[in-house]
Image: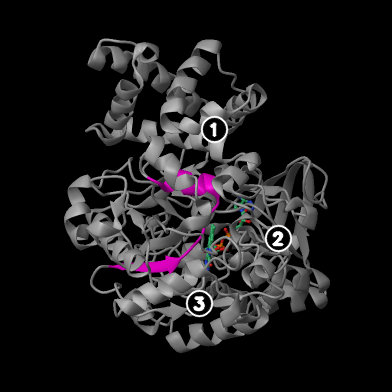
Amino acid sequence: MHTKEFDIVVVGSGAGGGAVAKELAPLAAHGMKIAVLEWGPKFREADYTGREVEMANRLYFDGGGFLTKDRNMTLAFARAYGGSTVVYTGTSLVIPKETLGRWGVPGLSWDDLSRRSQKYKEENNVHLLEPDLINDNNRLFYEGCRQLGYQVEQFPLNLKGCQGSGMCNMGCPNAAKQGTHRVQLPAAEKQGVQVITRCEVKRIDMETRALEAVVHPQESVGEPSKWAPGRYQIKAKIVVVAAGAVNSPALLLRSGLGGRLPALGRYWTCHPALILVAQHDRSITNYYGHPKSYYCDEFVDPDKFLLETCMYFPFVTAKNLAGFGPEHASMMKRMDRLQMILVLALDEALAQNRVTIDHEGNPVVDYRIGDQTIDSFVASMRASAKIFFAAGARRVHAPAAKKFFIEAEEKNQIDALITRDDFKLGKVSISAAHLMGGCRMGTNAQDSVTDVWGQVHGLPWLFAADASLFPKCAQINPYLTIMALADRAAEAVRSRVGELKTQPVGV
Amino acid sequence: MLVFSDGQKGVLWVLAQTIAPDVALLTQTQKTDFFLTIENALSKRPQTMQRQFLLFLKAIDVLSVLRYGKSLSRLDATGRSRLCRWLQEGPIGLLRNGFWGLKTLIFMGYYGRTEINEPVGYRPSKQGNTLLKR
Ligand SMILES: Cc1cc2nc3c(=O)[nH]c(=O)nc-3n(C[C@H](O)[C@H](O)[C@H](O)COP(=O)(O)OP(=O)(O)OC[C@H]3O[C@@H](n4cnc5c(N)ncnc54)[C@H](O)[C@@H]3O)c2cc1C
C-alpha cells in the first residue's frame, strides 16, 4: 500500500471536478498540495479514432449502455481526464430563472449562478455557430418548428476550431470542443495541481479523512498515470467529491454516510431521452457539421419535454429504432437521408428514484420511468412527427406508433397512430445523458446531503461539486450549471484555507 | 471471456437474420468478427447478466416450441418474425427487456462495424465542414 498526503483532494475531473481544480489552482501556485484523482485515462489525440464501438468502449462506463436496475433505460457517462465533457456536445445554456425558482433552495440565487455561468461561457469560448456551418438536419428542424409556430432557439456552443466532424459524442478528433480536458484541467496543472489518472477512489474513511484508491495498470490507449499501479491510501485535509451523479453518491454510500444522510442517493433525475428519426426522399447534410444547433422549448409547460436537434452514428441509430427486420434495415440503409430529434423529458425529483450500491459497492441506479414521463414521450413523438413532416420528411418512425413507418400521406392521423397504449417499456429505447442529483443541496440533513455551498451536512471538510448537487432536474442541458455550482464549492473551500494551514493532514 | 458454443451461435445467427437481415451479406471472417464483438461486449458485463443472456437464448427456443410447435431453427422466416414481434411487444416486461438487449447486441455486431458505414450511406469525415460548404 502506497501512502500520499495532500491538502485538498478532488475526486473526478469532469465538468464539476475540472472547474474546482482550476478555481483552487492559485492555492497550488502558493504551495498547497492539491490533487485530482480521476478513474479514467488521459487520451492522446490519436486515440480519438471516430470508430463508434471502439470509442464507446474507451470513453464511457459500460460502453455507454449502463443499465438502470429495471433495465428500462441506459445511462451515458464518461470515464476520462475531463469526464463527460470529453463526450458532451458542448451546448452551453444558463439555467432559466424559473427553473431556479422551482428548485427553491434558500440562499441560491439566479444572479449568482448566472454570473458564474457567464464566467465559464467566456472561458470555454461559447458562441453561436455561423449560419453557413449549420447543416440540413438542423436547418430542417428550425424550419419545421417555425412553420408550425413553435418557439425555436439556437444553441450557444463551446467550440474553438470546429471542423464539423459531427463526432462530438465520441470525443472530438479535432480538439475543438472546450471541455475541462482542454481548458480547466490543463490550466490547473500549469499552476501545480496534480491530476492523477487511472486512479479509482474506492472509499473515504470518515474518521481519518483518508481515501482508499487503486491506480489501474496502463492500457493500450491513453497516457500512463503519474503514479505506479497499485493500492493507495491518500490523506487529505479537504475532500471534494466530483465523480458525477452516479459515482459521487455511490462513493459516499460506500464510505458509510447512508445512515446519517437519508437523502443520499435519492431525488435522482436524468432527463430521460428518446432519439426520433425521419427519412427524407433525398440526401441531406446531417453527419457533417456540428450535430446540435437548435432546441425547441415550446412544450416545457405543460407537457414537460424539450426537443433538440441531434445526429447519431449507425449503431446508436439502429438501437434507437423500435423494431427490426426489413423495415428497420430500409431505414438504416440511408443514413444520409435521416433527420433526427432528441427528446428530453423533464422528470420529477422523487425520493424513490435513487442511486444505491450492490454488495460489491458498485452503483445501482434504481429509477422508474413514471407515468408523467411516458405522457411526455407520447406527446413528444406526436410533436416531433409534425415537425418532421413540416420539414418535408417522406416518412417518420415513432417508437410508440401502430406501425414502423408513418408515411407523409398519413400526417393528418398522427395523434391516432401514436398512442400511449403502444408505448411499451422495454420496447422503446430510452437513454439519458443528463444525470443529476443524489447529493442534492438544501438546508437540512433530512432531505438533502449538502448545504447551499456543496458542503456535506455536518462534515466541514467534505464537499460535493458536480451534477449530484442538483435538487431537481435542470430543464436544460446542465454542464454550465454544474460548473457554476462547482465554482461555489471551490469558493467555500477557499474560505477554509486559513483553517487548513493550522490543521494536520488526516486526523 | 465469454465464448459462445456452436449451438448458441446457431440460435443467435437465426435471430440475427430476422432482426438485421443484412447480416446475411457478411463474409465468413466478418461473421466471426460479428460474434466476437458480441462476446466482447457481454464479457464486460457481470456474470449474472451473461448467464441471463444465454438463458434468454435458450428460452426463445423453448417459447418457439410452446407457441408455434417448432424449434426456432425449424420456423420459417414469417414465424421467426412473429415470435420476435411477440417478444418485443408482448405483455411480459422481462421478455421485452431481454429482446431489447438481444437486438442491441446484434445491431452492435452489425452496424458497429466500420465497413458497414459506406453501404448504409454514412461517410464520416473529420473535416465535415468542408463537405458542408458544397
Ligand atoms: C453524450 C453526452 C452529451 C452531452 N451533451 C451535453 C451538452 O451538449 N451540454 C450540456 O450542458 N451537457 C451535456 N451532457 C451532460 C454533461 O456532460 C454532464 O452533465 C457533465 O459532464 C457532468 O459533470 P460531472 O462533473 O457531474 O460528471 P462527469 O463530467 O461525468 O465527471 C465525473 C468524473 O468522475 C470520474 N469518477 C467517477 N467515479 C470515480 C471514482 N470512484 N474515482 C475517481 N474518479 C471517478 C469519472 O471517471 C469522470 O471522469 C452530455 C453528456 C453526454 C454523456
Q: Quadrant of residue B86?
A: top left
Quadrant where the C terminus of chain A lies? bottom right
On screen, residue A233 above or below A409: above
- Left or right, A236 with respect to A274, comes to right
> Which chain letter goes with mark 1?
B
Distance (Cα) linking label 3 and label 1:
36 Å
Whether ligand 1 has any atom under 8 Å from the Cβ at mark 3 is answered as yes
**Which quarter of the rendered picture does the N terminus of chain A lie within?**
top right
In the depicted view, which residue is nearer to us: A442 or B120?
Answer: B120
The percent coordinates of residue A162 (x first, y second) are 68, 71
Which kind of residue does numbered mark 3 sit on?
Phe
What amino acid is labelled 2 in the image? Lys
As helix, strand or loop, the secondary structure at mark 3 comes to loop
For the residues marked 3 and 2, what is the alpha-carbon distance in whole angstroms? 22 Å
Q: Chain of mark 2?
A: B
Q: Is residue A104 visible?
A: no
Q: Is residue A386 a member of the stretch shown in magenta?
A: no
In which of the image's four quarters is ligand 1 placed?
bottom right
- Residue A25: % across, % down: 74, 74
Q: Amino acid at mark 1?
A: Arg
Please tell me which residue is depicted at 56% across the width and 29% down the height of the picture.
B25
**Label at residue A148:** none
Label 1: which secondary element: loop
Residue indicated by mark 2: B126
Callouts 3 and 2 on one subunit? no
Provide the residue designation for mark 1.
Answer: B45
Name the residue beneath numbered marker 3: A155
Say whether residue A258 is left or right of residue A179.
left
